[in-house]
Amino acid sequence: MLIISVGITKVVARKKYHAAQDTREMFQQAGVELVVVEQEVEQYSLQ
């Protein structure tokens, strides 16, 4: 994942993404802090 490979250490997101569990696990293993401002899951039409 590019975010991890370039050395980013913190990611701030407004809401959770419904299919991001793998990303959250990768961030945790790589030591990337993920901050989610609003704990609700983002909803998209047609998904």
Image: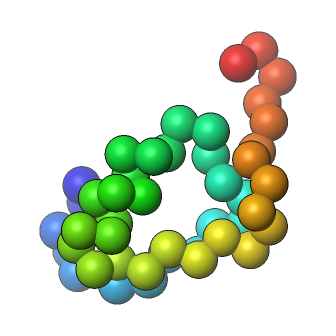
Q: Please name the colour scheme applied to the rendered image.
A: rainbow
Q: Quarter of the image containing the N terminus?
A: bottom left
> In the figure, is residue 13 to the left or right of 11?
right
Residue at 82 percent across and 22 percent down: it is: 45
Give x and y (percent) for residue 15.
72, 59
> Which quarter of the picture shows residue 30?
bottom left
* Residue 8 shows in the view: no
Residue drawn 38% across and 52% down? Answer: 23
Residue found 33% across the figure and 70% down from its top: 28
User: On the image, which quarter does residue 29 sit in?
Assistant: bottom left
Q: Is residue 1 visible?
A: yes
Q: So how many labels did they put on this image?
A: 0
Left or right, 5 with reference to 18: left
Residue lying at 70% horizontally and 18% vertically, measured from the top left:
47
> Viewed as shown, does residue 29 lie left or right of 38?
left
Q: Position of residue 21 (x, y in %)?
A: 45, 46
Q: Is residue 24 above or below residue 28?
A: above
